[in-house]
Amino acid sequence: MRRLDQSGFTLIELTLAMALFSFALIFIVVGFNSIMGLYETGLAMRDTQQVARRALNEIVLDARGATTVTKAAGGAAHQQTICLDGPNGMIMYDVNDGELFRATYALTEEPTHVVNGVQTPYCPSYLPAQSSYRDTRQIITPNGPESNSNSVQVVSLTANISQGLSGSQLSAPQPQDLTVTLGVAGNQVVQDNNLVFKGSTPECAIGVNYCSITVLTTDVSLQGGSS
């Protein structure tokens, strides 16, 4: 009578094989998650760059036709309200809850306040009631159509003038040089509190692996009053 062949793996061998397989599976899963994270971050970076570039181009076009620029007093250092005065009225850019608004005023509609007994145009620190301006629209809207796959938010808008008078009204007889900085971040970055500021510049928090923030800066000369 022949004996049956009972050769096979021992319990220790099976345990080692399962352990090796588990480690290999863990490495595969971690690697896959890392690749997907990089892919999602790449999409978010593409969206923030496209949105920021498109919005900044629109601000530059308006600034080139302006004669003076005014920054509203007060507010956060990284979110300034910018008003561009030109021959046909004033254009106001304002950031509110991650949205970038553009409001236009005719010459007879510009907001004014009394300075030394004279009604003087000024740049408000917030978007006034809708009845006071002739047109407004959202340039950047979280969860809006501007982004292809990820929602975005405006996190910073600042303006600096190379020459001008003292005070909030920055103007000069010669064309001014305006420097505008616009920061756009992925909505998830803001919601997860992965956003910090160094001065007025937004940055990713320390230890964040995947973060989508785009900061664009451009210089433009105001030429609305030049001949």
Image (cartoon, rainbow, N blue to C red):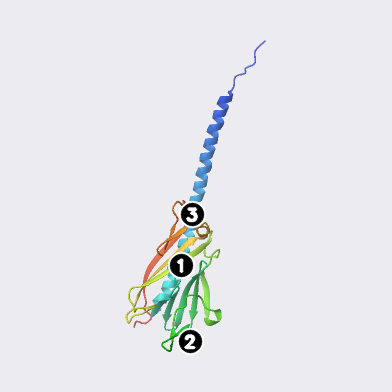
In the figure, 158 relative to 174: above or below?
above
Mark identifier at residue 41: 3
**Badge 2 or badge 3: first in the primary sequence:** 3
**Badge 1 or badge 2: first in the primary sequence:** 1
> Circles 2 and 3: CB distance less than 8 Å?
no
**Badge 3 or badge 1: first in the primary sequence:** 3
Type of amino acid at the residue the image marks with label 1: Arg
Look at the numbered disc 2 and give the secondary structure of its residue: loop
Q: Residue furthest front?
A: 116
Look at the numbered disc 3 and give the secondary structure of its residue: helix
Residue 114 or residue 92, whichever sits in front: 114
Q: Which residue is mark 1?
A: 54
In the figure, 217 relative to 17: above or below?
below
Q: Which residue is mark 2?
A: 108
Quadrant containing the N terminus is top right
> At which x and y percent is residue 22?
55, 35
Total marks drawn?
3
- Neighbor class of circle 1 (other Cα within 10 Å; few <14, some 14-19, many 20+) is some
